[in-house]
Image (cartoon, rainbow, N blue to C red):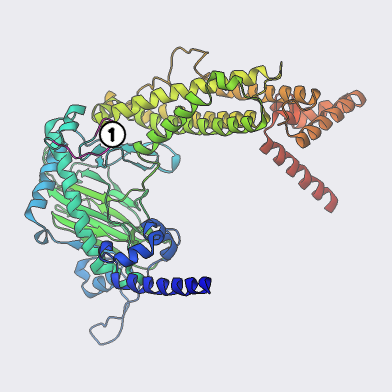
Amino acid sequence: VSMGNNKNAARKMKGSRGKASAKQGVGSDASSNATADAAAPTAAAISLPSKLKRERGTAATTPLPPAWKWDGKDGSGGSYQPKKSVLSPSDGEAFDKCLRRCYRGLSWEDPNALPSSLHRSFTTAFDDLNEAGLFLYDVIQPGGQRLSLTMVTRTLIGEPGSTYRYLGLRLFSHPWCDVDEDGNRIVSKSEPGSSLVRLGYRPDCVSALVRMGSVNEALIDRTGARLQQEIAPKIPNGLVGSARYNLTLINRMEPTSAKKDLKRESIYNMGKTSVSWHKDSGLQDFSSIAVYHSLQDYAGEHGGAGSSDDDNSKNKSWRVAVRVASADSKTPALSIPLPSGALYYLLDDFNHQHEHAVLAGSEMLRYSSTHRVAREGQGTWQYLRDKCNGVRSKLAVSFNDQALSRISSSAERKHLVKFCRSVQMILSEIEFDWLRQWYVQGRTHADLHPYWHQPIETLLRTYRELERFSVTIVNMLKKSPKKSVPAICEDLFDVMIEAIEERNKVRLQWHERYRDPIFSSLDVGMRPMDCPVLDRTERNSDTEMTEDLDNLRRKLRKWRASSSLLHAKNGGGNGDVDSEAMESSSGHQGKRKRGNEGDSDRSRSSNSKGGKSKKMGGDGLTGLTKKEQKRVASNWEKLKMKSKTK
């Protein structure tokens, strides 16, 4: 009876909770309904991204917008379908209907709808940031191919420790608030921005950074209101994405009169583009984007405004273009000229299935501040710092030299393998995702980003510590073919072989990138710098890994094969050797030996055809990792099946 009553009570509570949630609505204060909060602590703990994924899917599963269908009338009273591939506000009703039907989420506010204080803050910040020299060209690698220089200069500002990655390059942000010694956001007890001045930022630059943080808060509020007004009523449950902007990418774009090498938009023949068709990447799904757009008179090293060769127009305006991101779409693209000081939005899921571009004007200089919600986690300094601290702590306590010498049990070996794998993953992450990305951008970039000096030094120290541990492991593996080392097992060999092979592959790609001729055409301050732990002229073999990773890989395979044979001879050694693979390998080697005694010509023929033994260091299957051995066995089974069918 008691259990039945409890179940009935639970059903009633669940029902009342649903009613309370419905009354509460989207965007209302959760504390206004204490009963619902108390009854559903688990539901309240679910993050917005998780709710969105559960109820609305992801960016990849978002359907395309409705197909364009025109139902207007021509002058004779009949229906017609506009044949234009591009619509603009001058197209009147056709533009308005296409905007509402196919471009839900695209919205803008005219300058007179915004507070004058917002305009002043943006304009002053742009000028101060430019005066401080923060706008730089980026050397990007579209599609992982040849490097190219961006057509615009830009700078990234946002939450302390945030970064933004696009087209093979990681941008490091300038903080828009005060920070503590660990690089975290704090509220200054003195003058706002005083901690940034102590880091090395110029006072006028600091005031611009703090000002950008303030206008970001204003844009968060305006976007939230826009979402509730335009998007939430059209979505079940009114569940919209985030507009808690955590960074802004500010572009400085020169007009066509000064930037003669701008590329033409080739799909719709819209003219020259400063920013080609793209979706913004690295953002939270369903998150909004807000862009403040400002035009200024241009007078630079090119002698001020001049005539443009763009479509024979002497005064072509800057325009924002949008299109449906589908090759099969028949929906016209939109080309929208916006006045200086306009604020436009790409709300909710607009960025999922639409692309946008910036069409260059002929005379005016354009600034755009693009506020966005970057994914939290892996792209922040705080994430990497905490990850490194955790590994370094384990290394100091559980995997120092004394601890390694005491490893003897199977459980301890498995623990070592797991830790070693995490160390190799972090080493590669530090090297390729952070250090190389920092040093490839040059001395000027480093001097302009004083916030990142301490984090980079911390990463260098961490890399040295983890590299020293890796050298210790390699030396242990080197000894294992000659004598039994209790800590060694095949899985440890495999972790190191796979990590070294992958690191060597990516390292070669970076070496090729450094040799790209584009850097010789840049100022010295924009050319790659040497990294202290990656571009050494001298090496300490006791603590630093060899530069010749390809040779190390071959040695590891050879040591693995010899170690496996030694353990097999000793009856399994530490007990972690894969006995099935070992039997297969030993049988394979025995058959090969008998085959050599019976028919040496056949052996020579086999080696000349495939050269597999030579490739594996002359040690057969035992030089392969377990994953590779499984692939070999799988391929052998496929060959047998083919021979049977024949």
Residue 132 in magenta? Answer: no
Say if residue 71 shows up in the picture: yes
Depth check, front residue: 248 or 524: 248
**Residue in the picture at 17% in, 58% down:** 338
- Rendering quarter of residue 29: bottom left
- For the magenta stretch, what is the residue range? 180-189
SS class of the residue under badge 1?
A: loop
Task: Categorize mark 1 by other alpha carbons within 10 Å: few (<14), some (14-19), many (20+).
Answer: some
Q: Main secondary structure of the magenta part?
A: loop
Q: Residue furthest bottom?
A: 77
**Residue in the picture at 42% in, 21% down:** 533
Q: Residue furthest front?
A: 1
- Image coords of residue 522 (percent x, y): 29, 28
Residue type of the residue flagged with mark 1: Gly
Picture layout, residue 74 above or below residue 103: below
Q: Say whether residue 542 is left or right of residue 348.
A: right
**Residue in the picture at 80% in, 49% down:** 642
- Image coords of residue 580 (percent x, y): 78, 37
Depth check, front residue: 80 or 307: 80
Picture layout, residue 625 above or below residue 124: above
Q: Residue furthest left?
A: 116
Depth check, front residue: 38 or 94: 38
Residue 188 in magenta? Answer: yes
* Number of marks in picture: 1
Picture layout, residue 449 above or below residue 236: above
- Rendering quarter of residue 306: top left
* Residue hosting label 1: 183
- Image coords of residue 236 (percent x, y): 36, 71
Depth check, front residue: 404 or 123: 404
Say if residue 140 shows up in the picture: no
- Image coords of residue 342 (percent x, y): 16, 57
